[in-house]
């Protein structure tokens, strides 16, 4: 939801977006739950591209001004790393202050269940970004 919020308001000094879902169109074909999740949560068919785009944070990237840290797990099948990469590219192209940290050997919810050293890095990155912004 962080990626959605920063596309709709400039009230935050900084944002941390963790394992994001930013593009429902590509999510449908790349996530392990893409089709059923999209149909259940959006109440839309997966071929309804207009609705999928309407609910995609990437569609609102041109409104983002908030400095953003994206953090993604490289082995995440739920929210594939490509979701964060798409958003990162969009914000970088628009000259928004953005960084992306990739976590190797990590799945979805890595910050809770991942390797201890990577969980510490996850928390440190979050703290560093929030302290800076």
Image: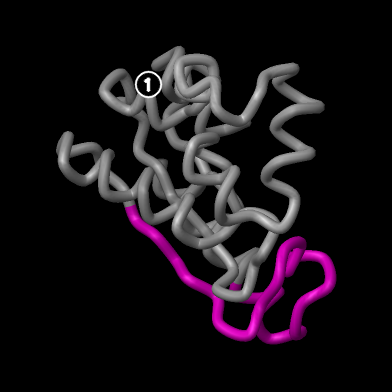
Q: Quadrant of residue 44?
A: top right
Expressed as whole percent of the image width and height from the top left, the position of residue 33 reads 75, 50
Q: What residue is at 27 percent from the left and 40 percent from the top?
A: 90
Q: Nearer the viewer, residue 112 or 84?
A: 84
- Give me the residue at 71% from left, 58% from top: 32
Classify residue 95 as left or right of residue 79.
Answer: left
Q: Give the structural element (helix, strand or loop) at label 1.
A: helix
Direction front: furthest residue: 47
Percent across and percent down for residue 51 are 53, 15
- What span is in magenta? 99-121
Which residue has dot 1 on it?
Answer: 60
Does 109 lie within the magenta span?
yes
Q: Residue at x 53, y 64 (%)?
A: 125
Is the N terminus in the top left, top right, bottom left or bottom right quadrant? top right
66 shown above or below 29? above
Q: Nearer the viewer, residue 120 or 88?
A: 88
Specify the quadrant of the image occupied by residue 78: bottom right
Q: Is residue 58 left or right of residue 116?
A: left
Q: Is the C terminus in the top left, top right, bottom left or bottom right quadrant?
A: top left
Is residue 55 in view?
yes
Foreground: 9 or 24?
24
Residue 5 visible in the shown view: no
Query: Could you say where residue 61 lies in the image, as x and y percent from the top left?
Result: 33, 28
Crowding at mark 1 (Cα within 10 Å: few <14, some 14-19, many 20+):
many
51 above or below 88?
above
Q: Position of residue 31 (x, y in %)?
A: 64, 54
Q: Give yes or no for residue 29 being in the magenta stretch.
A: no
Q: Residue at x 50, y 38 (%)?
A: 22
Q: How many marks?
A: 1
* 50 over 107 or under it: above or below: above
């Amino acid at each position: 939801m962080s990626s959605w919020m920063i596309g709709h308001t400039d009230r935050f000094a900084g944002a941390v977006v963790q394992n994001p879902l930013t593009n429902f169109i590509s999510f449908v074909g790349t996530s392990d739950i893409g089709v059923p999740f999209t149909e259940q949560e959006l109440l839309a068919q997966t071929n309804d591209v207009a609705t999928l785009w309407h609910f995609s944070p990437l569609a609102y990237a041109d409104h983002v001004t908030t400095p953003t840290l994206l953090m993604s797990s490289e082995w995440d099948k739920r929210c594939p790393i490509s979701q964060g990469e798409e958003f990162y590219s969009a914000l970088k192209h628009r000259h928004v202050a953005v960084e992306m940290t990739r976590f190797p050997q990590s799945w979805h919810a890595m910050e809770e269940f991942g390797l201890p050293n990577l969980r510490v890095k996850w928390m440190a990155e979050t703290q560093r970004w929030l302290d800076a912004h």
